[in-house]
Image (cartoon, grey):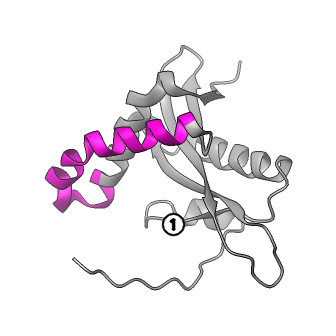
Amino acid sequence: MTRFSLSYGGIEHLDLLTDHRLEMWKEIHPDMVDQVENSRESTRKWIQSKLHNGSMVAMIVEEWNGSVAGSGCILIKEDQPRPGSNMLNFPYLLSMYTLPDYRNMGVATIIVKEAIKWSIEKGYDRISLHASRYGRALYERFGFEQTNEMRLKLK
């Protein structure tokens, strides 16, 4: 028997997806737990709107007994034409979260494999993400490469 299975989530998973996204942020920024929690309602509304308009694809990994082990999402983001690609949209992998009891058991690997497969099947020429220090090695195993994005914090 396979220990884990992946299914696509929907609006019925809104609270789960919200919780997982916020837990991800709390682990990345433990010094910002209050700010993360204060973003709960806006995060929930954002996820809800993306699920409703079809620009977000949610993936849920469950253990054989139905216990949720983790989740991740693909957000279809708008892009501009660039040399080598005229695609105006691209999949962006985000909100990757594995519950602590299921870490190092392949849960995130299941989601990344499915996200890549889904993106290829839909005809996209790339998939992007921002990796935390916790996930970088996982993504590198799949061939993701670091890019050179810069940011200026205005507030």
Q: Amino acid at mark 1?
A: His
**Number of numbered markers:** 1
Where's the C terminus, which quadrant? bottom left
The secondary element bearing badge 1 is classed as: loop
Which residue is found at the position 56% from the left and 45% from the top?
A: 73
Where's the N terminus, which quadrant? top right
Q: Is residue 114 visible?
A: yes
Relative horizontal placement of residue 18, taking residue 60 as reference (left or right) = left
* Picture coordinates of residue 47, whole percent (x, y): 45, 41
Which residue is found at the position 54% from the left and 13% from the top?
A: 65
* Picture coordinates of residue 113, whole percent (x, y): 71, 47
Relative horizontal placement of residue 60, taking residue 14 as reference (left or right) = right
Q: Is residue 142 visible?
A: no
| Occupied quadrant, residue 52 | top right
* Picture coordinates of residue 135, whole percent (x, y): 50, 60
Instruction: Judge the density around disc 1: few (<14), some (14-19), many (≥20) Cα neighbours within 10 Å.
Output: some
Q: In this picture, which residue range is highlighted in magenta? A: 26-52
Residue that numbered label 1 is attached to: 130
Q: State yes or no: residue 34 in magenta.
A: yes
Which residue is found at the position 52% from the left and 42% from the top?
A: 50
Which residue is found at the position 33% from the left and 59% from the top?
A: 28
